[in-house]
Image (tube, grey):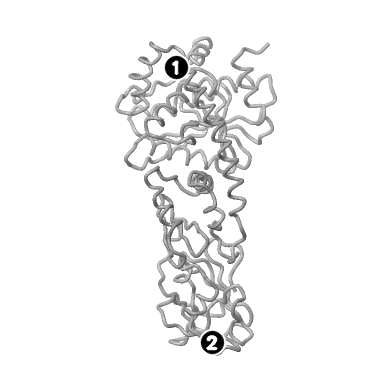
Amino acid sequence: MKPALSAKLLQTLAPWRNAPAWHIAFSGGLDSTVLLHLLASLANTETLPPLSAVHVHHGLQATADLWPEHCQSVCDTLGVPLRIMRVQVRPGASLERAARDARYQAFAEVIGAGHVLLTGQHRDDQAETLLFRLLRGAGVRGLAAMPVQRPLADGYLVRPLLDVSREALEAYAHAHQLKWIEDPSNADPRFSRNYLRHRVFPVLTERWPQAVSSLARTAEHLSEAQGLLDELARMDLHAADQPSPFPWLPLPSLALAPLCELSGARQRNALRHWLNPLTRLPDSDHWAGWDALRDAKGDAQPLWRLADGELHRCGERIWWLPVTWSDFSGDAVSWTCPEKTLALPGNGELEIVGKVPEGPFEVRYRQGGEIVEVPGRGRRDLKRLLNECGLPGFVRGRLPLLYQGEQLLAAPTLAGLWRGPASDWQLHWVPQSCDRGLS
């Protein structure tokens, strides 16, 4: 019969037994040392995916330079391959957050398709996370704390010890005479989590001995509540996820009218769910930006700036523009044929379809007052044509125009709403990160 901790671990990891590989995030501390030892021991009696360990070296303190050697020694003893990754932590307002971001970026580089990264966070960590986020005023999603599993790169992050106490991990480590690293920074109360761990939780547990398990259980309840909110959001977004009139435009978008039929709370819930994979979510005060965007007049083109991009409203539709769209400079680009395809800096690709006319050409962007020749309609003002087809304003300044000298030869025609030049060639534009173009 397997020891209780081993049996519990196998049960938790049952859904991942057919994964191509398991990677253990191995810091050398107590939690990851126990996890590594448990899995290496189970691999001797169970059929598990190939095991390997990953140690991320932040280089934030001198003593940390000794840790890779310790981790290598442990892995060699257990017969588990180890990969050591050195990262640079970008300075910021929170050193803890910056180190975490660097660590998970390194993990993402390791994870292959369907692979699983296993981390050693436990029940006490979960309780600390809940209390920390509660003090920061987090909503239900934040108070659900750490999920047992979530996507990571092309695979998954799994925390199989979230239901195990630190006390149980220490007992296992002592019973198997394991050696682990004690990070000196874990005792520094200047870090918020350390302050909670060393100053707050001892007081709480003195008065309420079950405080840690109770808080962890609350996080489970909130996780279930968040699951219900996500279900509601998917229902509400289904009505708003109507086909875009510009399917060639590679940007997430939603119809506004179905959202406006919802209560304010359901609007925010649906948008949180939609925006969650796209950007860091705004705090409560910042949601006034959504109200202003939603309630703007129909002919306005308001935007709502968020951490990782902007939400634009164009007519009765909202569009998400990631920060990568701001890389576009609008500078003219020379184009010498016979090359049929031209890479536009920050703006996708331009292609001539059909017989290539004689060059050289220059690709420019709108300055205002451009006139294009439309077969059957004569010379037409480009601005009027763009208004007719309702092209979103944030795209108009990126529309590539083909010039020869000072003569405007062609502009990409929009979704067939006007015909191109009466000749045997067409100008075709594929915007940035888009599979389907505009011609």
Q: Amino acid at mark 1?
A: Ala
- Of the residues under marks 1 and 2, which one precedes in the sequence? 1
Classify 376 as above or below 277: below
Identify the element where label 1 is drawn. helix
Quadrant of the image for the N terminus? top right
Task: Work out how far the residue at label 1 is from the one at label 2, CA to CA, in angstroms.
Answer: 75 Å
Q: What residue do we see at 40% from left, 52% from top? A: 289
Q: Residue at x 56, y 35 (%)?
A: 157
Residue drawn at x 57%, y 80% as measured from the top left: 338
Q: Residue 272 at x, y = what percent?
A: 50, 45
Q: Nearer the viewer, residue 199 or 177?
A: 199
| x and y, in percent, of residue 119 in the image | 52, 29
Q: Quadrant of residue 131?
A: top left
Q: Position of residue 331 (x, y in %)?
A: 40, 72
* Disc number lying in front (1 or 2): 1
Say above or below: 81 vs 275.
above
Crowding near pointer 2: few (<14 within 10 Å), some, many (20+)? some
**Element under label 2?**
strand
How packed is label 1: few (under 14 Cα within 10 Å), some, or many (20 or more)?
Answer: some
Between residues 98 and 60, which one lies in front from this camera angle? 98
Q: Is residue 208 left or right of residue 319?
A: left
Whether residue 435 can be seen here = yes
Res 32 visible: no
Q: Quadrant of the C terminus?
A: bottom right
Q: Amino acid at mark 2?
A: Glu
- Is 285 left or right of 383, judged from the image as shown? left
Residue 185 position, x and y percent, is 34, 26
What is the number of the mark on residue 373?
2
Q: Which residue is mark 1?
A: 211
